[in-house]
Amino acid sequence: MLPFLLRRAFSSILVMFCVVSLAFVLIRSIKGGPFEREKTPAHIVAAMEAKYQLDGSLWQQYLAYLGRLAHLDLGPSAKYRDWQVSEILAQKLPNSISIGSVAFLLASTLGVLIGSFAAMHKDQAADRAAMLGALMAISLPSFITGPALIAIFALWLGWLPVGGWGTAQQMILPAICLSGPYIAYIARLMRNSLLDVLKSDFLRTARAKGLGETSAVARHAAKIAILPVITYLGPLAAHLLTGSMIIESVFNISGAGSVFVNSIQNRDVFLLGGAVIVLCALLVLFNLIVDLLYTVLDKRIRLHG
Amino acid sequence: MASAPAQISRPDGWALLRRNRAAMISLYVLGLLALAAIVGPMLMPDALKTTSDAQFLPPRSAGHVLGTDLNGQDLFYRLLSGARVSLGIGVAGAFLSLVIGTLYGMVSGYAGGRVDAFMMRATEVLQSVPRILFIMILIAALDDRVKDGLDAARLWAQEAGWAAIEGFFRDAIPYSRILVMILSLGIVEWLTMARIVRGQVLVLREMTFVTAARAMGQSPWGVLKKHLLPNLSTIILTYLTLTIPAVILDESFLSFLGLGIEDPAASWGSLLKDGAQVINPLDSKWWLLLFPALCMSISLLALNFLGDGLRDAFDPKSAE
């Protein structure tokens, strides 16, 4: 177990290194620095760039940036003077993470439940309806469902607030919008994998023992059928964290989305880089946890990978 | 219905597809939509296509079937030209991703061993990173370069004295974002395709006809091109159909955030953004939201139905 852990931790560090390098190269290849404006004289631009360590060759800048990252320093923001990138992120990220987490819980639990239900009623009306609904939900992105739900439940019926994040009532619409397509995706995943497992011999034995279908599924089949869903949890977290940007824009929540959009428009290189790196680090960490969970759940897996 | 155990002789996939009613209806809907997008704007009078003072006319007003938007532009015309952009980016971006993904998957699967393990690990890494963030940065990085490139081409045509070509590039500059979106989405969206193609190549390369071709001295590239590619064509077509809605979704995601298609060009995503900006409780401009949303969800639904149908017909084992 320990060698496996070490190997995975090492590969996570490698992934982070690739992310940092890729982000650096891409961001620095955007034309126009944060200080270049039409009226600013060239020598002032140069002085500002020197102050923010944006001068010298790209290679020197890269090494300087890596050096600072090694000290867990994301640097100052180039646009918001006197602000550190980490301070801005500490202010904006928690909202995005909590939206993502609520949607994550909804998507994984509801998805698994609906998928199992559909598999156990294969080719019956309930299954057909669930799968048709799933395909529709996958085809309806949150920037369509969001304004539509606001128009219906907030503006027309007046049951729920138009925007914001914090109270339980404010959370309902954003959470439904963000998780909807992923509930559907996981339901399809779970249904197909459970259908495969239901055909297997050990389940025939369980039924022959006299176990009812529901408890056979709950006790034996679900444990194996859920594995593809576990593999999907990593990508799911990534989708939800980025998907949260749309939700924030639709429901007027201040979060990471505005950080990305504004820092790209302002050429705020450190803020953009810092946001990318922190988000990716969170996801890499999450993937590591999912990997561990997978090995705990699936005893068949060989511990070298 | 299609997860039957692999038979030696599977029924003809096309026959299966023709019997799938949802997929066939979707095919006709998509055909009609594409036709309307290509031909529609050509048939409309030029007066409809410009901005006007007739701001926010509701649907069914004189001359404007679906009403007008903030700039007094006809919404029906905007929707059709948005269809060109959205569907065009979807198809072109998916096609670019197909080329990259197929090449990557074929090389990885055929090479096998360490090369394969490394190449697949690399796609896993990319899969776990939020792609859309890198697409955002890529767009910002490519944007100025493509504009400069078009401008250079314009100047070059000007010096050569080709007025028509110069005019083409001058008109194209405001629309350069479309090209940028195709490039950045295509460069990033090939991971699924690579994985599927590689899996198929792993199966195919063990077959006797491939061994025979190798024994007769066919080079690896020759085997890939002559023997593997034809056998991959239906599966590539299937995943092309499923990649198109993914690209359209990403495009509208970015356009909705204001990082994608910009005026004067319009896509369904940018129209949705404009529509979402003007909803308010007192005076709802519902048509600006409803019609782009309808166009978008109908075509995404049709593409997904068609893709699912193709997958059931040609790749029954990998439902999901």
Image: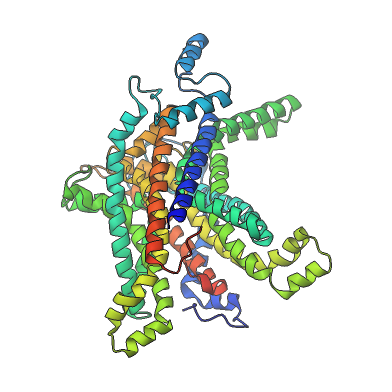
Q: Is residue B250 visible?
A: yes
**Residue B98 in picture, x, y percent from top left:** 60, 55
Looking at the picture, tell me which residue is in the foreground, B225 or A232: A232
Q: Residue at x 73, y 31 (%)?
A: B162
**Residue A81 in picture, x, y percent from top left:** 35, 19
Looking at the picture, tell me which residue is in the foreground, B256 or B53: B256
**Residue B211 in picture, x, y percent from top left:** 76, 71
Q: Residue at x 61, y 79 (%)?
A: B12
Q: Is residue B95 above or below residue B203?
A: above
Q: Residue at x 16, y 46 (%)?
A: A167
Q: Is residue A57 above or below residue B164?
A: above
Which quadrant would residue A235 be assigned to in this image?
bottom left
Identity of the residue furthest to the right in this view:
B216
Looking at the picture, tell me which residue is in the foreground, B303 or A81: A81
Q: Is residue A271 above or below residue B66?
A: above
Q: Residue at x 36, y 76 (%)?
A: A221
Looking at the picture, tell me which residue is in the foreground, A144 or B206: B206
Q: How many marks?
A: 0
Q: Is residue A38 visible?
A: no
Which color scheme does this rendered protein use? rainbow
**Residue A288 in picture, x, y percent from top left:** 41, 52
In the shown orientation, is residue A305 left or right of residue A227?
A: right
